[in-house]
Structures are given as structure tokens and as C-alpha cells.
Image (cartoon, rainbow, N blue to C red):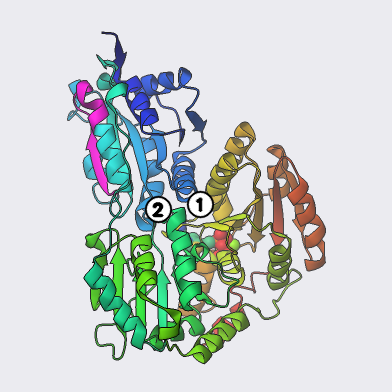
């Protein structure tokens, strides 16, 4: 029987499981994996400029497609660089596998060159970490990694690939590989009856939705349930593309900088149907909402994994269920006529949400409030928006309404530098869709080198840099806690227009609000992508507060 190398066995097992794309930075520690890509053109490997960018791309691609994001990096330095994407995948519950070239088994434990024990290093970051120690079990380990990434609460898995294992020979395993389907948890009929009873007597029920692993059919079930029964929706931190924000039932995002309106909705709701959320810090307004001494609020929490219950919130009922099983199950039991929700409460909450969508006039020559409304009007109905971390992200996150087909790729981990790699991954996958990345001047410089990946792979998004010459978010905290004592937050930036042109992008500087429209139209028409350097005043430190305001607050 003919034999193949361990490296080839890794690649061919992945392909047999349905893999078709991966990201990474090459290393001498996994040459036989790279070599196997040559003979498998159905698998597209995108070579990136930094493992941080590569792991973000793998995570964002997985978020967009619902498939397993794959990333390949080298030992010690490559692996530690990639850590940011693993942490991001964990916080966002995104299925991902990070393959790391590893020191050969014959030298392990001697602190060989670039040696790390990845089971220890990633033990605290990833959902599961493993290593292949027998070439004949390569396929088994890869299959288990795949299954771990997609089952229960999806997440990142790390697989270390010792160099000697990758070059040893093993038998061809492909024909014996069965597809691995995501196990879907079903709601129990008794539990559905209990929830339905609560909804029947509720006046102000709210769906709180979020978390990873939503399939197309889960999203469709959410839409059907909410619209048919008139149940309003709040999304968890950075999951607001799960539901059409333009519908009157959308009441906002429970995320960082939660609006008073959204907070009130979550406080006043008498039934909270928390679908697939893990009640993280942002969604709970820093662990203040949904406390265990709450009165008059009944909470059901559902999740694909039982491990996500009782982390902070003590729900009245927990259910291990997929979104579709819960929502379709309830749809079958409940009839709109039997419900008596307080419609004026929903209407008032929506009015409050819409009011919050109108930002105040901004200081400086570029008013981002006006710019964002122009963008909102011009964006195609299936645009993909990406961003990273910084106060600039408040604009797309709080002042844009995502319609049914628009998608948001944003890091639940709050990692700076995510937006550009995410946008490149999105453009690679969906070249015909408009992909728009929001970044700050600090945020952009965390990963701007990936413009090289964009150039090489012809994946060309539009990038907006909200350039205020400061790590503005930190400056904001500084001014709140240590007024007028600026330390480590000023930024002296390069000329982003020249930089972007070096990568072949259309690039322009926007210095006044009235310049934006023409530049954005050219950006949308540019076949080589675009970078717009938008000069915003540091004084406009948040959409609602200036630096002066912060200094005045005691
Ligand atoms: C990788 C990473 N490093 C540091 C931080 C802490 N941090 C959060 S926001 C921020 C500043 C962002 O600056 P910029 O991108 O210029 O956006 P601005 O707040 O000025 O709009 C920093 C340093 C982080 N979230 N992620
Ligand atoms: Mg800034």
C-alpha cells in the first residue's frame, strides 16, 4: 500500500473534512504541510505578514462562513504571535484550529530552539490543545480537533505538529474519513412548555441573542419567531448583525458603552429569553444587570453547551438547545392571539433606540456623525463591516443599523488590529461584496502590514482610518481618572496616504466633512481597494463627550 507523510496526512484529512482555505505564515518547522498544499489546489493557503494577522483572518473567516477557520504557524515566536487570534476565537466562540510546527519528538523537553509546550501555553487560552505523537494517529487527532472546534460552545483548538512526525510515513487514511457534522442540541418539550407559559403571561418579554455558531437556519428561526410573535430583540456585545436592526423590534446592542435605553429595556423586561449568550461582562453592563436579587424578571438561558450556565447570572431555567430548536419549538406552541405584550412599551423603547441613533454635532472639521449617515445610505444591503478596538468603533457599532444581509466582523475580545485582517479574509471569500473596515490610527498600525497580504492575494477592502493622533480610548480613561495628565497616549503617525499608495490602494485624506462623499464613492469604485485617512479631532473623544467635558467631570 502506498504511504504518505504525516504533513500530507494532516492536509488530506482536513480536505476530506471539507476544509478549503487556510491562513498562516510559513516556517521551517512544517515544511511537509506546506509541500502538501502544492498537490491540493482545492485548498487555498493565504500567506500573511504576521501570525497575529493570520490568526485574525482565520477567526474572521470562520465567523463569516460558519466553517472551521484554519491557521498554520511555526514554533515559539510564530505560535505566540498567533495567540491573539486564539484568544479572540475563544471570547467570540468561533470554531478554529491553529496548527503549530513543533520541535521533533526526539528533542522535546531539552528547551530546543523555539521549543514550547503548546498544551501548557494554550491550555488557558484555547478550548482544547493537543499534539500528534504517533504518525499513524494523525488523522484521528485532526478529526478530534475539528470536532472539538465545532461542538458545544464552538472555539479554538491548538494542534502541535512535531517535525519528525510530519516527515514520517503513514498509510493513506482519506477513504475512511466520515464527515463530521455539528451536533445540534434539541430543546426538551417540557422546557418549551415552561417557557411558552411564561411568554403567555409576559407583558415585556425580550430576546437577548448572541454567541457563536449561529447557522443560517438559526438566524432565520430568530427572525420568524420575533416577527410572528412580536418579541423584541436585544443583541449581546458585537452580535448585532444577528437580527435586522431596521425592524421596529430591534432595541439595541447590549455592549460596551451600553445606551441608557438598552439598559432600561433589559432592566424592565419581565421575561428574558437569552439565546446562546454566555452573559459576558459587556452584555451584563459589567456584571450589574440580571443580578440574582432581581424582582419580577424571569430568565431562561439556552446554549449549545451546558458549560455556559451560572457563570454570573442565575437563570430560572437553563436549556441545552440550539437557537432553532428553541425558537421553532416555541413557535409551534405559541399563537400571536394568545399574547398580551405591552406594545406601547416596545414602541417607546424603539423610539429611544432611534433617538440614540442621532449623534450630536461633533467638534472639528470632520463630523463623524454626518459621515456615518452618508455611509449608511451608500452601503450595499449585503455589505460586510469590520472593526477592531478603540473609540472609533463606537461609530459603526452604535450608529449604524445592520440590515438583514449585512454582516459585522468585530472582535468580542476587544483586540485592536482585528478590522483589517478580518476585512481581507472577508474580501477573499466574498470578492463581490463591499467590505468596509473601520479602524483608528492606533488600531490600524497594529496590523497594517497585512496590506501586503491584500496586495498579493488581490483581496482589497475599503479601510477608513479615523485618525485623531491619539490612542483615544486610553486618553479618555486618562482624562477621567487623571485629568490633564497625558501619558503614553499621543501618536505621531506616518502619512497613511503615502503608505497605502505604496500597497497600490486608492488613498485620500479627508479633512472636512464635505470632502468625504466624493472620496468614499471613489473608494467604492476602486478595484484595488482603498484607504481613507479621515482627520478627526482628538477633542471628539467619544460621540457624546469632548476632552473638555471629561476634565470638567469630578
Ligand atoms: C491589542 C490591544 N492592545 C491594547 C489595547 C488597549 N486599547 C484599547 S483601545 C486603545 C486605543 C485605540 O486607539 P485608536 O485605534 O487610535 O482609536 P481611538 O480610541 O483613538 O478612536 C488601546 C491602546 C487593546 N484593546 N488591544
Ligand atoms: Mg486614535
- Which is nearer the eye, 403 or 288? 403
User: What residue do we see at 64% from left, 69% from top?
Assistant: 538
Q: Are marks 1 and 2 in contact (CB under 8 Å)?
A: yes
Q: Is residue 138 magenta?
A: yes
Figure quarter occupied by ligand 2: bottom right
The image position of residue 523, as x and y in percent, is: 75, 50
Q: Is residue 164 above or below residue 190?
A: above
* Location of residue 334 (image quadrant): bottom left
The image position of residue 554, as x and y in percent, is: 48, 89
- Which is nearer the eye, 94 or 82? 94
State the residue position of label 2.
88
Q: Is residue 316 above or below residue 75?
A: below
- Which is nearer the eye, 472 or 430? 430
User: What residue do we see at 69% from left, 72% from top?
Assistant: 369
State the extent of the magenta-drawn residues as a range. 126-140
User: What residue do we see at 41% from left, 68% from top?
Assistant: 209
Q: Is residue 470 visible?
A: no
Q: Residue furthest top?
A: 1
For this view, does 222 lie left or right of residue 7? right
For this view, does 16 lie left or right of residue 137? right
Q: Is residue 380 magenta?
A: no
Q: Is residue 421 above or below residue 212?
A: above
The image position of residue 482, as x and y in percent, is: 47, 77
Few, some or many residues within 10 Å of mark 2 (<14, 14–19, 20+): many
The image position of residue 256, as x and y in percent, is: 46, 71
Q: Which quadrant is the N terminus positioned in?
A: top left
Residue 418: which numbered mark, if any?
Answer: 1
SS under mark 1: loop
Q: CA distance from mark 1 to mark 2?
A: 9 Å
SS under mark 2: helix
Amino acid at each position: 500500500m502506498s504511504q504518505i507523510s504525516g504533513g500530507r496526512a494532516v492536509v488530506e484529512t482536513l480536505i476530506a473534512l471539507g476544509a478549503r482555505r487556510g491562513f498562516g505564515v510559513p516556517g521551517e518547522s512544517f515544511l511537509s504541510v506546506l509541500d502538501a498544499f502544492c498537490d491540493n489546489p482545492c485548498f487555498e493557503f493565504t500567506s500573511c505578514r504576521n501570525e497575529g494577522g493570520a490568526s485574525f483572518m482565520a477567526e474572521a473567516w470562520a465567523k463569516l462562513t460558519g466553517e472551521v477557520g484554519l491557521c498554520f504557524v511555526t514554533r515559539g515566536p510564530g505560535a505566540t504571535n498567533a495567540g491573539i487570534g486564539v484568544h479572540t476565537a475563544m471570547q467570540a466562540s468561533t470554531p478554529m484550529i491553529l496548527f503549530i510546527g513543533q520541535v521533533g519528538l526526539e528533542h522535546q523537553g531539552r528547551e530546543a530552539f523555539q521549543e514550547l509546550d503548546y498544551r501548557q501555553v494554550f491550555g488557558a487560552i484555547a478550548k482544547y490543545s493537543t499534539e500528534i505523537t504517533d504518525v499513524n494517529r494523525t488523522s484521528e487527532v485532526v478529526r478530534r480537533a475539528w470536532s472539538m472546534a465545532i461542538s458545544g460552545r464552538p472555539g479554538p483548538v491548538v494542534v502541535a505538529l512535531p517535525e519528525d512526525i510530519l516527515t514520517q510515513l503513514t498509510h493513506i487514511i482519506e477513504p475512511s474519513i466520515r464527515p463530521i457534522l455539528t451536533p445540534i442540541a434539541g430543546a426538551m418539550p417540557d422546557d418549551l412548555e415552561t417557557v411558552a407559559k411564561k411568554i403567555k403571561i409576559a407583558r415585556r418579554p425580550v430576546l437577548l441573542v448572541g454567541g457563536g455558531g449561529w447557522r443560517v437556519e438559526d438566524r432565520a428561526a430568530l427572525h420568524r419567531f420575533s416577527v410572528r410573535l412580536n418579541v423584541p430583540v436585544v443583541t449581546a456585545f458585537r452580535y448585532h448583525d444577528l437580527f435586522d436592526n431596521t425592524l421596529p423590534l430591534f432595541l439595541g446592542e447590549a455592549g460596551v458603552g451600553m445606551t441608557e435605553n438598552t439598559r432600561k429595556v433589559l432592566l424592565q423586561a419581565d421575561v428574558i429569553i437569552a439565546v446562546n449568550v454566555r452573559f459576558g461582562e459587556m452584555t451584563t453592563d459589567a456584571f450589574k444587570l440580571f443580578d440574582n436579587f432581581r424582582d419580577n424578571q424571569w430568565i431562561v438561558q439556552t446554549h449549545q453547551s451546558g458549560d455556559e450556565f451560572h457563570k454570573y447570572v442565575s437563570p430560572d431555567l437553563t436549556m441545552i438547545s440550539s437557537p432553532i430548536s428553541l425558537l421553532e419549538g416555541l413557535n409551534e406552541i405559541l399563537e400571536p392571539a394568545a399574547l398580551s405584550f405591552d406594545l406601547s412599551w416596545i414602541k417607546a423603547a424603539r423610539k429611544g433606540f432611534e433617538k440614540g441613533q442621532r449623534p450630536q454635532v461633533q467638534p472639528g472639521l470632520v463630523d463623524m456623525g454626518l459621515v456615518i449617515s452618508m455611509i449608511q445610505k451608500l452601503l450595499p444591503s449585503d455589505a460586510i463591516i469590520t472593526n477592531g478596538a478603540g473609540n472609533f468603533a463606537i461609530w459603526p457599532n452604535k450608529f449604524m443599523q445592520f440590515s438583514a444581509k449585512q454582516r459585522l466582523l468585530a472582535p468580542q475580545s476587544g483586540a485592536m488590529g482585528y478590522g483589517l485582517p478580518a476585512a481581507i479574509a472577508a474580501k477573499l471569500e466574498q470578492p463581490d461584496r463591499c467590505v468596509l473596515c473601520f479602524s483608528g490610527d492606533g488600531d490600524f498600525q497594529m496590523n497594517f502590514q497585512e496590506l501586503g497580504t491584500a496586495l498579493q492575494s488581490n483581496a482589497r477592502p475599503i479601510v477608513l482610518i479615523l485618525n485623531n493622533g491619539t490612542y483615544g480610548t486610553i486618553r479618555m480613561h486618562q482624562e477621567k481618572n487623571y485629568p490633564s495628565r497625558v501619558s503614553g497616549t499621543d501618536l505621531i503617525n506616518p502619512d497613511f496616504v503615502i503608505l497605502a499608495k505604496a500597497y497600490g490602494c486608492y488613498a485620500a485624506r479627508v479633512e472636512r466633512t464635505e470632502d468625504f462623499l466624493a472620496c468614499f464613492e471613489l473608494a467604492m469604485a476602486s478595484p484595488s481597494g482603498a484607504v481613507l485617512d479621515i482627520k478627526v479631532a482628538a477633542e471628539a473623544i467619544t460621540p457624546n463627550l469632548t476632552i473638555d467635558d471629561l476634565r470638567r467631570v469630578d
